[in-house]
Image: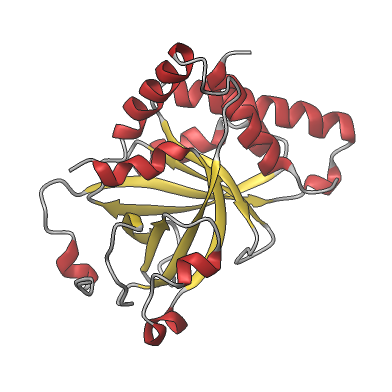
């Protein structure tokens, strides 16, 4: 099996597992660097999978997986993976981050998913803004795969790892250390009543480890949940 295919198969099956010390600047001040870029982020939210037969679900998820492969190989899908316990909401099953900053293109990419067409998933979409070079993940993934091909000591099977995502109001405080891999603001698309939020990808394998990176006085502002994805995300901190 092609290794990209194996990796996305692992992610897709995990998503499908549902049964039938400086304080950060305020958000307005943070994103002033010229490197800041926007991306389209979407939760994969359960729609009505219970209406599908086992065969229909299998077909939908095979198509979901194949479509993820196509989007990744086209450079459209930068980040994907299932959410893990603890969850903010049990209906949130996974995430996509698209390379585009165009809302309509992001919607169009999401709508190509056979899992969406079949009613397994529906989107909850945001524009996220950060100065971490997320498009470098395309290069990092290729380099990682090349190392695996060349080094017999590296297992052939793709292995992801756990991270922790943290969300808080846009003005929340936190300790900006090397544990923060991605520091983004997020704005809900098609919902003007939703307040902007802060979104962090943390280099931590569980919530307890993630919380240890915060000052106790700041913890009440943050919600934490698990995410399983590519180990290449952790390499972003080594890119200036």
Between 165 and 51, the residue placed more toward the observer is: 165
Q: Residue at x 52, y 37 (%)?
A: 110
Query: Coloring scheme of the render?
Result: secondary structure
Image location (x, y in percent) of residue 201 = 41, 55
Q: Is residue 60 above or below residue 169?
A: above
Q: Quadrant of residue 135?
A: top left
The residue most toward the front is 153
| Horizontal relation, residue 67 to residue 172: left or right | right
Image location (x, y in percent) of residue 1 = 64, 13
Image location (x, y in percent) of residue 102 = 33, 41
Between 230 and 131, the residue placed more toward the observer is: 230
Image location (x, y in percent) of residue 212 = 44, 72
Q: Residue at x 63, y 63 (%)?
A: 87
- Numbered-mark total: 0
Does the image show residue 106?
Answer: no
| Horizontal relation, residue 145 to residue 93: left or right | left
Between 50 and 216, the residue placed more toward the observer is: 216
Q: Residue at x 36, y 22 (%)?
A: 143
The residue most toward the bottom is 217
Q: Residue at x 63, y 55 (%)?
A: 84
Q: Is residue 60 above or below residue 237?
A: above
Does the image show residue 43?
Answer: yes
Q: Quadrant of residue 179?
A: bottom left
Between 50 and 65, the residue placed more toward the observer is: 65
Q: Is residue 151 above or below residue 51?
A: above
The quadrant of the rendering that contains the C terminus is top left
């Amino acid at each position: 099996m092609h290794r990209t295919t194996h990796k996305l198969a692992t992610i897709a099956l995990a998503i499908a597992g549902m049964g039938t010390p400086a304080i950060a600047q305020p958000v307005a001040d943070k994103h002033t660097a010229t490197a800041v870029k926007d991306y389209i982020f979407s939760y994969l939210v359960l729609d009505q999978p219970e209406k599908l037969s086992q065969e229909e679900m299998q077909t939908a998820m095979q198509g979901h997986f194949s479509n993820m492969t196509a989007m990744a190989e086209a450079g459209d899908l930068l980040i994907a993976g299932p959410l893990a316990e603890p969850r903010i909401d049990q209906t949130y099953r996974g995430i996509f981050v698209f390379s585009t900053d165009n809302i309509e293109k992001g919607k169009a990419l999401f709508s190509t998913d056979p899992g969406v067409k079949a009613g397994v998933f529906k989107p909850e979409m945001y524009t996220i803004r950060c100065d971490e070079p997320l498009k470098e993940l395309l290069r990092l993934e290729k380099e990682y795969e090349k190392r695996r091909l060349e080094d017999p000591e590296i297992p052939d099977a793709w292995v992801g790892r756990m991270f922790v995502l943290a969300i808080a109001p846009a003005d929340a405080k936190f300790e900006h250390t090397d544990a923060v891999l991605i520091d983004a603001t997020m704005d809900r698309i098609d919902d003007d009543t939703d307040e902007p939020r802060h979104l962090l990808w943390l280099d931590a394998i569980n919530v307890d480890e993630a919380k240890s990176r915060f000052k106790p006085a700041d913890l009440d502002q943050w919600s934490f949940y698990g995410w399983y994805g590519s180990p290449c995300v952790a390499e972003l901190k080594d890119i200036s």
